[in-house]
Amino acid sequence: MLNLLPPLNDHNLPWMDTIHPIVVHFVIAMALIAFVFDGIGVIWRKPQLFEVSFWNLLFATGAIFVAIIFGQVEAGLASPYGASRDILDIHTTIGWSLAGVLSLLTAWRYVLRNRDPEALPAKFLGAGAVVSGLIVVQMILGDRLIWTYGLHTVKVVAAMREGLI
Amino acid sequence: MLSVLLQPSSSSPLALAYRPESMPLDQIASQLGANGLPYPLPIHPNLVHLTIGLFVIAIAFDVVGALYPLEKRVFRFLALPITRGGFHDVGWYNLLACCLITFFTVAVGFYEMLTAVPLPGVRSTFGLGSMTTMLWHGVGGVLLLAIITAMTVWRGFQRYAWRRDMGRQVQWLYLAVGVVMFALIGLHGTLGAQMAAEFGVHIAADQLLQAGADLHTALP
């Protein structure tokens, strides 16, 4: 059975390099910029920017599901050690939650946009701030997995295969 | 004349004229953490999310705006009210934000490259050494910033002057340049990813392993 799986490279991956961080560009950039454009749109009274925010938010929501799929596969192959195991658990939990939260936020936005595309209630801006905060926390956790613990880096994978970790 | 200038002083044709006993980085080494930075996580890779995400989506939405006549019926079927101008607004404002942020992405990138200590003896998947990879990534980064800035100016002229009254706000050539940029950014990003995952730059675990430390005790 196991020999049916593709061979793993020196990143412990069946593909060249981690894909999750690439897909995540689109979740992070689009969701955060949506909040920024909403803020600027309200302060400078530029409802044109609300439309830009809507599309960015919709795209972020689509992208997070792709990010989760690759994230789960790559987390499964990451062999976390020490405290990185807990960080990966929290990162996974927040990741799945964010998929739900972003979907709800986008659905709410869809309804608001259908009612009046030129207006944005302060409540939505508040929710956007909270979700943006959650995304920043999620980014920091993901950052720690790679920049502190070096998961899927050649050096750490080699050490793991030698039994040093 | 040129050959005289390029002729190295030592007998080895490509040796450095002078090699210091300690590297300039040693002067601030005591202020740096295990990851080679004075702060716990590198900033450049996080700003890169914004640069890449904003650029790609800017061009993608201008493509959607340009192909609007083809996709009108699809969106009507989806019960999603759209305007062509809305797509082009995404194309413009995302690119503008990308351009502003990318100045910081490149600036922080250079700071973090100056403090980079790549693992010795490593060859990347591309077959390059660490110094060659960093040089390409550094020069490439400035080049990409220049192109992004030029494209933002170009996009602005199309939006506010040349094509102000037209339904399709962008020239086909602009979209073609954008798609070529996808390939350049992909290649450039791969070099950056190799600096982390293969050369271990600013990764605490990789640097500690190289120093012979036990990760179970050395990391929090």
Image: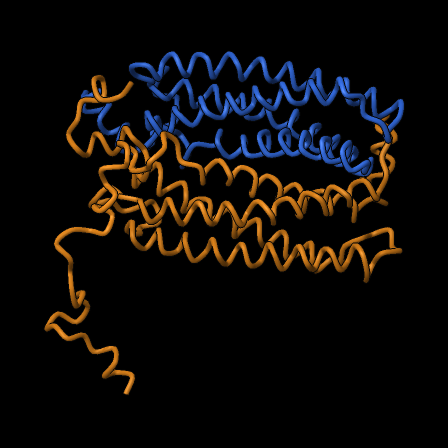
Q: Residue furthest left?
A: B11
- The one nearer the camera, B76 or A142, is A142
Quick check: A29 above or below B215? below
Q: How many numbered circles are shown?
A: 0
Query: Residue A114: horizontal and vertical position, in percent?
Result: 87, 24
Query: Residue A51: horizontal and vertical position, in percent?
Result: 79, 34
- The one nearer the camera, B109 or A27, is B109
Q: Is residue B201 left or right of residue B27?
A: right
- The residue sitting at 67% across, 44% down in the picture is B58
Q: Residue furthest bottom?
A: B1
Image chain in blue: A
Quick check: B55 above or below A73? below
Quick check: A74 above or below B179? above
The image quarter in which residue A43 lies: top right
Query: Residue A145: horizontal and vertical position, in percent?
Result: 38, 24
- The residue sitting at 28% across, 32% down in the picture is B33
Q: How is the image coloured?
A: by chain
Quick check: B196 above or below A63? below
- The residue sitting at 45% across, 40% down in the picture is B44
- The residue sitting at 67% across, 43% down in the picture is B94
In the rendered image, the quadrant that contains the C terminus of chain A is top left
In the rendered image, the quadrant that contains the N terminus of chain A is top left
The image quarter in which residue B74 lies: top right
Image chain in orange: B
Query: Residue A21: horizontal and vertical position, in percent?
Result: 48, 31
- The one nearer the camera, A47 or B57, is A47
